[in-house]
């Protein structure tokens, strides 16, 4: 008898699963239909994103076209694993306090970046000492003074930076005394994230599957930017949409269409064809 492994997909959100139109992001019907059919065949699907609980929640509310899923979500680039159905945090990291202190000192001396501090469900921006020309984020956030920071709630930090200053900031961040204890993840041309050393979306996926008691599986991942590189490289099969960063495309086993044109649906179609052929071969071998 053939031992059938569980078939698991984890997808990035922005630039991958979500469509963009008129400055709004949403999940398209093509992806929704494909995911529902995938889950309906006793397969598994969930998301692995840099967003936290607060910024993914609108995609799972009744008044929107919601994203189908049947596994815990990997959030904040692997620093949080969340059972959304039961509103339960399964795993949460606390970011390195020393690096936060060095980051505060840096932005107080330099006006080329804003410091964002994330908890599992909130965003805080360290209040700049003077007016900034940097574009503020479109997600909800609270300005906070350094003596108001609750260090034991911070799961990761981010820097908002202009494209012109990104390269300098990346270099500066590596010079912090505690840099060897963190991982630096550029998640967009103007957004640089840091998590604890050894943390990644893929490590979060492993924790989510352990919680779900899924031990024998094939894992398939898809994503578009450098914070997805690790999970695409380490998956059984990794996919990248047409719009992905070139390094991510190089790491992927397969390329699919643009995120605005059902990239995840195309991935699922390719997987179903591969799985179908696999079982045809197994059946043929057993018949012999």
Image (tube, rainbow, N blue to C red):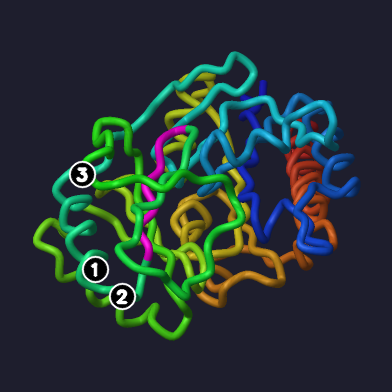
Our reading of the magenta stretch's main secondary structure is strand
Q: Distance between the residues labelled 3 and 2?
A: 19 Å
Residue at (31, 73) in percent of width and height: 111
Tell me whether circle 1 and circle 2 mark residues in contact (CB < 8 Å): yes
Q: Where is residue 125 in the image (x, y as percent from the top left)?
A: 40, 51
Q: State the separation of the CA atoms marked 3 and 1.
A: 14 Å
> What residue does disc 1 label?
173
Coordinates of residue 200 in the picture (x, y in percent): 39, 47
Camera-side residue: 235 or 244? 244
On-image quarter of the N terminus: top right
Q: Which of 4 and 221 is in front in this view?
A: 221
* Left or right, residue 62 beside residue 182: right
Q: Which of marks 3 and 1 is nearer the N terminus?
A: 3
Determine which residue is flagged by label 2.
169
Q: Name the residue under label 3.
A: 96
Q: Nearer the viewer, residue 47 or 178?
A: 178
Q: In this view, does 156 lie above or below 261?
A: above
Disc 3 secondary structure class: loop
Q: Out of 10 and 130, give the one closest to the viewer.
A: 130
Vertical placement of 128 versus 148: above or below?
Answer: below
Callout 1: SS: helix
Q: What residue lies at 47% left-to-right and 75% top-to-bottom? A: 133
Estimate the spatial distance between the alpha carbons at disc 1 and disc 2, rounded to whole Å.
Answer: 6 Å
Say whether residue 160 is magenta: no
Q: How crowded is mark 3: few (under 14 residues within 10 Å), some or many (20 or more)?
A: many
In percent of width and height, residue 179 lies at: 17, 60
- Quarter of the image where one finds residue 178: bottom left
In the image, is 27 to the left or to the right of 97?
A: right
Q: Please give the range of residues in magenta.
A: 114-120
Q: In which quarter of the image is the C terminus?
A: top right
Furthest-left residue in view? 177
């Amino acid at each position: 008898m053939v031992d059938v492994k569980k078939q698991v997909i984890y997808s990035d959100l922005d630039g991958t699963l979500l469509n963009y139109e008129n400055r709004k992001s949403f999940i398209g019907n093509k992806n929704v239909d494909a995911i529902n059919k995938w889950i309906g065949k006793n397969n598994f699907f969930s998301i692995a994103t840099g967003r936290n609980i607060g910024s993914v929640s609108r995609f799972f509310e009744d008044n929107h076209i919601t994203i189908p899923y049947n596994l815990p979500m990997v959030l904040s680039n692997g620093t949080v694993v969340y059972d959304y159905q039961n509103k339960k945090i399964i795993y949460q990291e606390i970011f390195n306090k020393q690096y936060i202190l060095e980051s505060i000192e840096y932005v107080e001396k330099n006006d080329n970046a804003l410091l964002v501090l994330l908890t599992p469900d909130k965003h805080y921006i360290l209040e700049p000492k003077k007016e900034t020309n940097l574009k503020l984020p479109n997600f909800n956030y609270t300005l906070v003074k350094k003596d108001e920071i609750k260090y034991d709630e911070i799961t990761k930090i981010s820097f908002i930076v202009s494209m012109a200053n990104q390269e300098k900031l990346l270099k500066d961040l590596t010079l912090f005394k505690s840099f060897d204890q963190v991982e630096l993840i550029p998640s967009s041309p103007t957004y640089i994230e840091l998590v604890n050393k050894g943390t990644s979306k893929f490590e979060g996926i492993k924790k989510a599957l352990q919680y779900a008691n899924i031990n024998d599986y094939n894992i398939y991942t898809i994503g578009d930017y450098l914070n997805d590189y690790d999970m695409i490289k380490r998956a059984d099969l990794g996919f990248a949409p047409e719009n992905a960063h070139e390094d991510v495309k190089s790491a992927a086993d397969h390329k699919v269409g643009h995120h605005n044109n059902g990239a995840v649906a195309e991935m699922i179609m390719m997987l179903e064809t591969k799985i179908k052929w696999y079982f045809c071969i197994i059946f043929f071998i057993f018949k012999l």
